[in-house]
């Protein structure tokens, strides 16, 4: 005799990138008041579905359903793209044109980054192995997306240079 199964308990749980990196086990409350700890770690990323066997609805004379939890990553310092993490890298115009060495805050601490000369706002710098941990033990990448910055105060020389580039140089 096959025992019918109660419905699954379906829910979302929201975590931060830091929670995933630190293997924090977020809790979620079931309708019957039970607290479930959701295992988060290697292989965890936005949209991942975690199935907890027989942790779902309890109905008399039925096999208990599963808890089906969808992981949502809260927006923060990093944007999640699969197992890659994306972060903005603000760069001044002169450093974007000439290139520079700088440091960005990676998920596990500061990382040196080389901004190549002539890097526009569409330029991405990929730092391998600094993203989220996959189940196979490899890590995704950290992707720094260049964002051009103007100086705080207008600069007469820069304004003159840009005007001459746009309008042609008149001597």
Image (cartoon, rainbow, N blue to C red):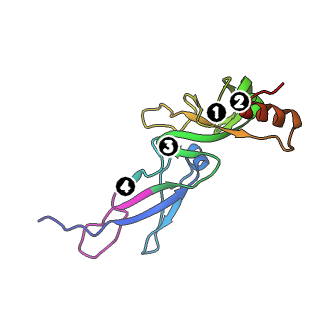
Q: Is residue 74 magenta?
A: no
Q: Earlier in the sequence, mark 4 or mark 1?
A: 4
Disc number lying in front (4 or 1): 1
Label 1 with label 2: CB-CB less than 8 Å: yes
Tag 3: Cα neighbours inside 10 Å, few (<14), some, or many (≥20)? some
Q: Looking at the figure, which quarter contains the N terminus?
A: bottom left
Residue 157 makes an appearance in the image: yes
Secondary element at tag 4: strand
Disc 4 marks which residue?
A: 51
Q: For this view, does 154 lie left or right of residue 44?
A: right
- The stretch in magenta equals 51-70
Q: Relative to residue 134, is residue 125 drawn left or right? A: right
**Disc 1, SS:** loop
Estimate the x, y position of residue 147 in percent, counting from the top left: 67, 40
Q: Are marks 3 and 4 in contact (CB under 8 Å)?
A: no
Q: Which residue is mark 3?
A: 81
The residue tagged 1 is: 120
Q: Which mark is residue 96?
A: 2
**Image quarter hosting the C terminus:** top right
Spatial CA distance of label 3 from label 4 is 22 Å
Asked if the residue under mark 1 is in contact with the one under mark 3, i.e. CB atoms within 8 Å, the reply is: no
Please tell me whether mark 2 or mark 4 is closer to you in this view.
2
């Amino acid at each position: 005799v096959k025992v019918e199964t109660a419905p699954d308990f379906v829910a979302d749980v929201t975590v931060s990138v830091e929670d995933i990196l630190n293997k924090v086990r977020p809790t979620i409350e079931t309708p019957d008041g039970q607290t479930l700890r959701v295992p988060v770690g290697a292989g965890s990323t936005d949209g991942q579905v975690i199935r907890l066997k027989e942790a779902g609805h309890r109905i008399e004379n039925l096999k208990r359903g599963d808890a089906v939890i969808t992981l949502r990553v809260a927006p923060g310092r990093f944007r999640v793209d699969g197992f890659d993490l994306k972060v903005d890298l603000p760069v001044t115009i002169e450093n974007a044109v000439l290139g520079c060495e700088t440091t960005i805050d990676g998920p596990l601490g500061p990382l040196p980054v080389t901004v190549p000369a002539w890097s526009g706002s569409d330029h991405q710098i990929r730092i391998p192995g600094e993203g989220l941990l996959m189940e196979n033990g490899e890590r995704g990448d950290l992707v720094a997306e260049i964002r051009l910055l103007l100086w705080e105060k207008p600069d007469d020389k820069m304004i003159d240079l840009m005007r001459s580039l746009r309008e042609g140089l008149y001597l």
